[in-house]
Image (cartoon, grey):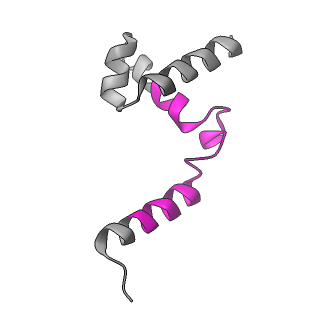
Amino acid sequence: MPLDPVARFRRFARAATAELGALDQSFLGRGRPLGAARVLNAIGRGQEDLAEIRAHLGLDSGLASRLRAARRRRT
């Protein structure tokens, strides 16, 4: 039975992210996961307000808090 278009896209997306290493603990060998890299990229582009970053990246408050706490532990 052929997969419906949504299932096909999800299957592709899982394969692509696995191949690219986007879900690894060290995205692109930088020592941090993709979520943290996205937040740092937003900060580097001038976004400083956490609520603004959350809205821009579509993050929930729990993930944003965990990323911020992990960053504080690293410094």
Q: In percent of the image, x 55 and y 16: which residue is there?
A: 68
**Labels in figure, total:** 0
Q: In percent of the image, x 31 and y 27: which residue is there?
A: 56
Q: Please state which of residues 46 and 73 is positioned toward the viewer in this rendering.
A: 73
Q: Please state which of residues 19 and 64 is positioned toward the viewer in this rendering.
A: 64
- Left or right side of 9 for 16: right
Q: Which quarter of the rendered picture does the C terminus lie within?
A: top right
Residue range of the region highlighted in magenta in the rendering = 10-39
Query: From the viewer's perspective, is residue 7 above or below residue 36?
Result: below
Task: Pinpoint residue 55: horizontal percent, then vertical percent.
Answer: 31, 25
Residue 24 visible from this viewpoint: yes
Q: Please state which of residues 71 and 1 is positioned toward the viewer in this rendering.
A: 1
Task: Pinpoint residue 19: horizontal percent, then vertical percent.
Answer: 57, 60
| Quadrant of the rendered image containing residue 34 | top right
- Left or right side of 35 for 10: left
Q: Is residue 20 magenta?
A: yes
Majority secondary structure in the magenta region = helix
| Quadrant of the rendered image containing residue 10 | bottom left
Query: From the viewer's perspective, is residue 47 above or below residue 26?
Result: above
Residue 40 visible from this viewpoint: no
Q: In percent of the image, x 51 and y 33: which residue is there?
A: 35
Task: Pinpoint residue 58: horizontal percent, then vertical percent.
Answer: 35, 32
Task: Pinpoint residue 49: horizontal percent, then vertical percent.
Answer: 36, 10
Q: In percent of the image, x 37 and y 79: which residue is there?
A: 3
Farthest bottom residue?
Answer: 1
Q: Please state which of residues 34 and 63 is positioned toward the viewer in this rendering.
A: 63
Q: Which quarter of the rendered picture does the N terminus lie within?
A: bottom left
